[in-house]
Image (cartoon, helix red, strand yellow):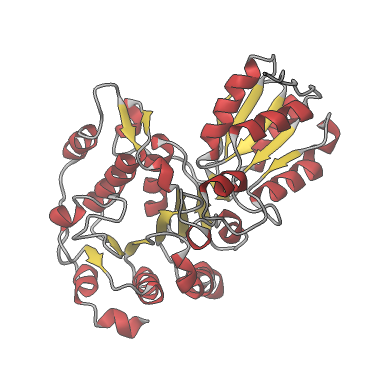
Amino acid sequence: MLGALSRNRPLLALLRGGNGGDKAASAALWAASKRFMSSDNTITVREALNSAIDEEMSADNKVFVMGEEVGEYQGAYKVTKGLLQKFGPDRVLDTPITEAGFTGLGVGAAMYGLKPIVEFMTFNFAMQAIDHLINSAAKTNYMSGGTINVPIVFRGPNGAAAGVAAQHSQCFAAWYGQVPGLKVLVPYDAEDARGLMKAAIRDPDPVVFLENELLYGESFPVSQEVLDPSFTLPIGKAKIMREGDDLTIVTFSKMVGYALKAADELAKEGISVEVVNLRSIRPLDRETINASVRKTSRLLTLEEGWPQHGVGAEICASVVEESFYYLDAPVERICGADVPMPYAANLERLAVPQIDDVIRAARRACFRKEEKKQATA
């Protein structure tokens, strides 16, 4: 690994202090952030990620980006747009189509003192590099007695998109969430994406950053605080997206939006729902989850991944262990279907959770009867 690193001239240039990048003052960074904001104070998740990476590369010349098509093509999903032009090919490295190769280079560079951001075109392809993520990145700090840090970010789209079938639709949150030594982040909106990405880049440990392809183009309102270059979010802390008294829904990534829409519908029936956006799978904010369940006395978990050994299963176990006597109803768990993702659009829709599934489960938890629809001639 280090032999390959020694042959990589751009990485060696960084190690020797060359090509420090743009060292603009914080005022310039602030101006760069504001350029993403639309007239209605919203930015897309893609812009939030791009601005966060841009600012961290400007602030620290040890940060660099590598992956397939991150440079000349501006990124498969345009998250790295403009970075090659600003920082040059020494800090925005287009790699061959070899996840095992460039991930190993990234891990070696992190051990050597740099701060790589490794992009996977999809996390399904990260399985080609799973040994580097688990056996090298995640375990080295422990195995070295705390003497070697691996400050690296693995990022890219995760989970179901649309029409890309079984080999491109898998959610890896539960996979990586099981591994000691990794931190696993799952942003939902622009605030999450920007604050968590900056925190991930600054963190001394390896971070798996699971984005969602269908959220990249979604716009969300942001405050001036979120656009400040110093803004970060704490890793391991969930966010209450909506307060409620009757039911807690714990979820992450794209499913947060589904939970919020379901909560709007359930409010019309008099069911008050509290929505918890996890933001972080590992570490898991058990304190916030259990505090919410002790308040509402009911729990519904929602995720796109498969049910067996999933994130929802871990949340249910935590609540049963810590808050069992507060529960007034059995926990409800909504997951993706226990099958590889179908390609056909009608079957694909049946394989991932829908808003109606959330509403029906919430009614069951609150002991509300299903409304029977009148047949029409």
User: Residue 137, position in %: x, y?
Assistant: 47, 69
Q: Quadrant of the C terminus?
A: top right
From the viewer's perspective, tell me whether residue 75 is left or right of residue 358.
left
Residue 196 visible, this angle: no
Examine the image and state in which quarter residue 155 appears. Answer: bottom left
> Which residue: 80% across, 45% down?
321
User: Residue 305, position in %: x, y?
Assistant: 60, 51
Q: Considering only vertical position in the picture, is 50 above or below 103?
A: above
Q: Considering only vertical position in the picture, is 200 above or below 215?
A: below
> Which residue: 69% across, 52% down?
307
User: Residue 268, position in %: x, y?
Assistant: 64, 14
Q: Considering only vertical position in the picture, is 208 above or below 271?
A: below
Q: Considering only vertical position in the picture, is 49 above or below 176?
A: above
Q: Nearer the viewer, residue 340 or 303?
A: 340
From the viewer's perspective, tell me whether residue 244 is left or right of residue 220.
right
Q: Nearer the viewer, residue 97 or 63?
A: 97
Instruction: Please identify the residue farthest to the front as the structure is shown.
Output: 377
